Amino acid sequence: MTTQAAQVAQRNGIPRAFEAGWLVAAVLVPAAIMHQDFMLGFIQMPKVFVLRTAALYLVAVFVIEWAMGRWQAPDQELSLLQRWRTAVDRHPARLIIVGAAAVLFATLVSIAFAPVKSIAIWGIDPGWDTYGLVSLAAYLVIFAAVATHLRTGAQLRRLVWALTAVSIAISLLSVGQHFGIDPFRSDPSPAIRARSTFGNPIFAGSYLLMTVPLTIALFTSYSDRFAPLVHIGLGAGLVALQFAAVLFGLARGPWFGLVAVAVASAVFLAWTFGSRVMLRAAAITAAGLAMAVVLSSLPLPGVAGGGPGAATVVQRIETVGPSIIEGVSSRGIIWRTAADVYLGVPWVDTELYPEIPSLGFRPLRRIVGFGPDHFGYAYPMAGESTYTYELASHGHSFFVHTLIELGFLGLASYAFIFVALVIVLVRMVRVARTGGYPEWFGLLLVGLSAALVGRIIEQIPGKAQISDLALSWMLAALVVAMSTMRFDAPEAGAPTRPPRRPRGRQRAATSNPLRVAGAAAVVAAVIAFWFVSVVPYVVSARVGFQAGQAAARGEEQRSIDLYIQARDIAPDLAVNRLRLAQVFFSAAGRVAGEERARFIQQAYDEARAVLDRNPLDHRAWSRAGEFKRELAAVTRDVTRAAGVRDAEILVQLMPGFWQAHAALAWAYVRLGGYEEGLEASTRAIELSAAAGPLATHLLPYVEALALQGLGRIDEAIEAATRSEALRPSASAYQLLQQLGATSSSDAAS
């Protein structure tokens, strides 16, 4: 490629290529969703696929740009790394850049000490929404692309308009769900809590509370193009659907976040532009909220008496006070248990249970954490807690969650980037206040500031997911890009980057054959990586869903064949292996002898394959314990100790959960260890009772079996009677008959 051709491509093609990448991510990550009858993970997996595809595309564009000479050092004595360092040192938003680098550094350090590197890098379920390094890397690539290549006011407006458009589209889906219209569900009905494309109304609210202030700020800048009433009406129409979506989600956290956004917007607008602009934005907000309230008062189809939708919103508002107390109480339990985990650093005794990887470096855990995506494994090891009967896979606070997974280093890194954003935004808003920026630009700064305030407030008790995380990193990159824009006059057109002081001897940007060859190799590697590490998961999820449908229809062999195909497409996708294992195990129940043992062994092998990748996976240990127990019961080749070993490990991983103790009790009783089974069932009942009413009739039933095996018939009858009283079942009925007792159903007859 000639120097002139490279310069033309760089001037025209490369900026457009970068913009196409971040626009695709901005629009499709939150909007991506498939029909529920199309694939497993029909909400999460399309979003992850789009995010990683966009990130890899941007990596390829970065490499092509490098090949064209864009990153050539202006001084032969300066290396590329030295030039980057110099550029960062001079950047007006260098604190944000350093903060992003600190987050990456903290994550890498945490991974280095993580007990299971595979899940720290790829996440618990590859291809699903996780906090692993691969997901963070995707966010950072998009951050880098926007921060370094968004240079003009036109690009800025296009991105914000794209965010506004997609927020309106997903809000429209929420409204449709509220009224029983959902093209992604097989049997849509009016949704009490609309979830849009996010699968959870809280996640929808988390996303929209950041787009609402941007939409209002963007359209307020068009006040000189319309008559006042027309301008207010059009702006209100843009935000009305977003307000309605948040209302229909009935998520109190985003509600409080929006209140914080409204207050912050009013304060920043009044301080920056005075009452005129603030009142116009307030009018748009008030009119939009009024439209949303009117929309919520419309009757719901298919609901007796017409059922005004506003009833649920009003009821939710009426419970705000008690819900705050309840929410703080339940989250307080999680936070206290998380504090026990952070301070106590619990872990399995790996000398007694070498199947579990050693934690190691315990004194460092408060600094580096347990590792990305390890919260769900560290938290249950805290032991007894009034909340641990529910498996908390997240800290219900981004900050608590980060503290457990990345330690103090990770929490400090995120705190640093939040503070850096505040500092840079305040500096820029001050410039806007003095007229140093055009009004539209200053309004967007105010919108970004309000979005940051709302995000911080909402994430104190909130949970971050792929869509709002991607948006958060994109908005942070916007701040970085906007900090370099300068204007000769407020009315000037496109902003430009400030000129850099020449350093050393300048050379024209050139490309050379070695660079081009290297870039071609890297791009080919990126494409290969996409085919190997991105595409297979969505294909496997599609085939796995078809396998599940075949199983539901009773087509056992076809289900097995499809699950094997899905497994071979993505061997490290745990969900298909565990479902295949369950099909094998179900098939074993319909045969006998060696064939039964063969099916159970196949089921166990699939569960063990999951554990080979992630030896902390509770699901796999639970299934493996069940399969090994039955294998020990049907063959003499497996001892009782081996038959209960996996169930014992599950108890070590989840000492405060009655389910793990119940599985251990059942394994002991099934294999004739009645004394140990009675002890485990008693412990399970105690833990279940601590959580409230006895969770299941199975616990006293297993206790009755253990007592029967020990010859304590009267106690066994009493336990079996309690089981049948909780829920009549054929098993309890037959046991009572064996014990010579009368069941409650017989007595009633």
Image (spheres, rainbow, N blue to C red):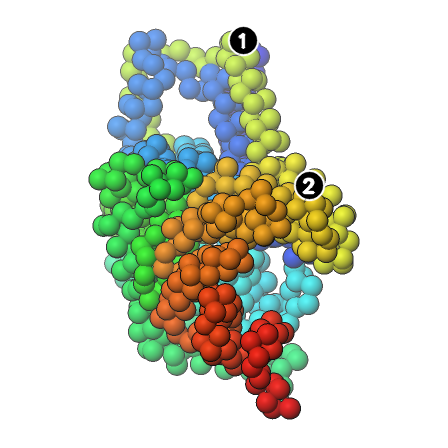
- Residue 189, labelled with which disc? none
| In-front residue for pair 368/729 | 729
- Residue 564, labelled with which disc? 2
Locate residue 316 relative to residue 746 in the image: left or right: left
Residue designated by label 1: 513
| In-front residue for pair 447/89 | 89
Residue density around tag 2, few if under 14, some if 14–19, many if 20 or more, within 10 Å: some
Give residue 408's position: percent from left, percent from top. Answer: 25, 44
Q: Quadrant of the N terminus?
A: top right
Residue at 28%, 23% in the rendered image: 86
Q: What residue type is labelled 1?
A: Pro
Q: On the image, which quarter does residue 456 sit in?
A: bottom left
Furthest toward the front, the residue is 711
Q: Can residue 640 be seen in this view?
A: yes
Q: On the image, which quarter does residue 563 sit in?
A: top right
Give residue 123's position: percent from left, percent from top. Answer: 47, 42
| In-front residue for pair 716/613 | 716
